[in-house]
Image (cartoon, helix red, strand yellow):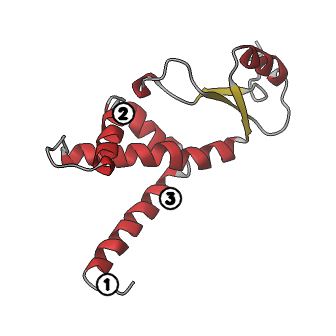
Amino acid sequence: EKSADYRHAPAVWSGFGRAAGVKKPAHRGVAGSGRRRGTEKVEKILKKLELKIIHATPEEHDRQMASSQALVHFLGRGLAEMRLTKQKISTPDFQSLLKINDLVGNDTWQLFMDMQRFNPFAGEVRKNLVEALRGIEENIGRVTCNL
């Protein structure tokens, strides 16, 4: 018995999950290199739903998602580990950090681990962040106010 060939099927991804509190996703991505069989039908359905279509190759998708998703979740999990909470004296920036923490903290650890392990670019983005923070930390004691 011959199995189905899904190599040319269009890939559709909703840009926001339930944890983000979005009822209707703002966009859908149709990933694939070049025009693939079935893509036109999927796009027609998505357009009827008034959804924005973003064309990307799987590599483009993964590179962008490493920063826009995996990095944000990495930061959010780090903030959660710090056990940050609302404070009487605060800033809008701090409130934004708490919001990130709240959004990603509702996702499962399995989802977090999957996006970190299975996106081939997530590790590089995490490493760059950690190195950048380490460099900033080292410079705090060395840099004068004459920046």
Q: CA distance from mark 1 to mark 3?
A: 32 Å
Mark 1 or mark 2: whose residue is earlier in sequence: 2
Please name the amino acid that badge 3 sits on.
Answer: Glu
Q: Is residue 15 left or right of residue 54?
A: left
Mark 1 or mark 3: whose residue is earlier in sequence: 3
Please name the amino acid that badge 2 sits on.
Answer: Leu
Q: Label 3: state its secondary structure.
A: helix
Q: Check contact, mark 2 vs mark 3: CB within 8 A.
A: no
Residue 91 position (above or below residue 50) = below
Q: Label 2: state its secondary structure.
A: helix
Mark number for residue 124?
3
Closer to the camera: disc 2 or disc 3?
2
Q: Check contact, mark 1 vs mark 2: CB within 8 A.
A: no
Q: CA distance from mark 2 to mark 3?
A: 23 Å
Could you tell me residue 86's position as x and y percent? Answer: 19, 40
Q: Label 1: state its secondary structure.
A: loop
Name the residue nearer the viewer: 76 or 115: 76
Residue that numbered label 2 is attached to: 103
